[in-house]
Image (cartoon, grey):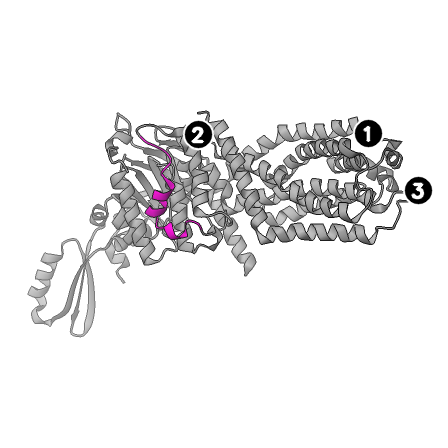
Amino acid sequence: MSTEIGSQALGGPTGEPVVSVRGLQMTYGPRDVLTGVDFDVHAGEVVCLLGPNGAGKTTTIEILEGFRLRSGGEVRVLGEDPAQAGDAWRARVGVVLQSWRDHARWTPRRLLEQLGGYFVAYSTPERTRPYEVDWLLDTVGLVEHADRKIGQLSGGQRRRLDVAVGIIGRPELLFLDEPTAGFDPQARRDFHDLVHRLSDLEGTSILLTTHDLAEAERLADRMLILADGHIVANGSAEALTRQVAGNAEVRWTRKGERFVHATEDATPFVRRLFEQHGEEIEDLEVRRASLEDTYIAMVATFESGARRTPTLAEVSR
Amino acid sequence: MNPTRHAIGLGLRRGWTEFVLSLRSPQDQGFYMFMGVATLAYLWFNRDSEVEGTDLLLPSFALPSILGALLAFGVVIGPAYSLAMEREDGTLLRHKALPHGMQGYVTGQVVYHSLSLFPLLLVILVPSFLLFDDVMSNGLAGWATVVWVCVLGLLATLPLGMIIGSVVPSVQKVGTWGMLPVIVLTSISGIFFPIQAMWGWVQVVAQVFPTYWIGLGMRSAFLPDAAAALEVGDSWRSSLTVLVLGAWAVFGLLVTPRVLRRMARRTSGSQVQEAKEAALQWVK
């Protein structure tokens, strides 16, 4: 595939973000799911939206996809309001859907040829659409199953087909809602490679949700944590970890008793520890906070309604 | 390239593919076989009974009526089920995510369900000609009538199926909101016995809906002119048939796009997810 399309070119000449969300609100009856979500996704970025079940991740993505009408706030996706955007906008956006039994009698090849056809009208010399079906089948690892009935594919193969359908129009922006749910480790690894390839070679901007924090850490340039109806954290995995007070955990045993202490600066703490107790200290362990610790600390703090700096100590036991 | 026209072309191809895949599927072959065998068995066991007050044999009278009823029934229930199903299984959502995808999808549905009529009519018509005498009394003119009744009947009933499929809350509800009324309507539409055998108000209800008129049109195509004496007003009432079916077709053309658009707007991934979870519960 051509690689001359740099990630800079896609955001428009002004460098405007591909996704821009300001004060997004969503209310279902009496329940406020989103109370004021703000974030941007820039051209070529891979951004991961994290959050507990029911936090509104799917709702947010569906609003950005133009599949759901918001209750309030400003949303721009590729320069347009998804609630009013037309078919030309639709051709530039890719959506990976979770299917389960559709097109059971079709084969992957036939389905990709049929669905890819809709993008032909939107092909430009700079960005030819759709992808060639054989290339796509190869890319998602479905070559051997290309002519089998879709109804006979395994869950993982079906998800790969979903991904292929989602990207067939060679989107500038791709939405993935829990793309690897139900994948085995190999399929997950392959999928991660595919995301890297799309992002690096094609300059595709990607917004995905996941529950798998290791996956988020591997894929995303930036993470957003959605809790309590708004974005409570925004940054790289490292930056997020730094935001949590006490980002390292020190464990030791003294006189047969276990101790755990969360601290921001482990080295001076351990030095003091030895100065105080010397040889009594055994089984010393220093562990930096993982993204998972950080995530759980942040979500726990914000869900309990408190608005203070999350601390590791609260979750270390 | 005009994207709308292009999408409609893709829809035509989609409908044709669906039709070919359906013909190859053992499940659908079984359905056609069952319909054929059931209808022919009914006609065969009644092959010697005469229609009261005439010298017409029952198969001659009942065959065109049954063809008409199957047309109306199949073309309402078929799209109703597939729309309700494809809303839940994500087919519709996939098309919603494509530029001009809904136009292609709806075109595909119309083509597929129209084509599906052929095997259904053929499995009944072909053996009937071999088994019974005097099936077609009017020669070429009769066949021409069959064609226009089928086309007009399709236009009148197919949109109704799409409307039902768009408004029912779930696939399980197609039985209640689609199947049941259509069965009731079919049974009062003069398929198995002349409509005059029923109470007056039932006759009026039957004559409001397209099923009766499709059956009447079919009878006018197959039966000799003398048989018109069995009908309301001793006539085939062909112009009224065109008028009533035409009115339903116009109704469908005006209402269906709106209903489909509303349905498409409400379709989302979470809806598909909910349906999946509900279906899994169903299996347990």
**Spatial CA span between label 1 and label 3:** 21 Å
Residue type beneath disc 3: Gly
Q: Secondary structure at mark 2?
A: helix
Q: Residue furthest right?
A: B53
Within 10 Å of the Cα at label 1, are there few (<14), some (14-19), or many (20+) other Cα atoms?
some
Q: Nearer the viewer, mark 1 or mark 2?
A: 1
Asked if labels 1 and 2 share a chain, the reply is no
Picture coordinates of residue B240, whole percent (x, y)? 78, 27
Residue A29 visible? The answer is no
Give the numbered dot on residue A87. Answer: 2
Q: Is residue A317 above or below residue B29?
A: below
- Residue appearing at x 41%, y 33% in the figure: A119
Q: Residue at x 75, y 50 (%)?
A: B39
Rendered-image quadrant of the N terminus of chain B: top left
Q: Amino acid at mark 2?
A: Asp
Confirm whether residue A106 shows in the render: yes
| B227, above or below A193, in the image | above
Instruction: State how far apart marks 2 and 3 are (Cα).
Output: 62 Å
Residues shaded magenta:
A127-147
- In front here: A112 or A260? A112
- Please state which amino acid type lies under the numbered disc 1: Arg
Q: Which mark is residue B53?
A: 3
Can you identify the residue that label 1 sits on? B237
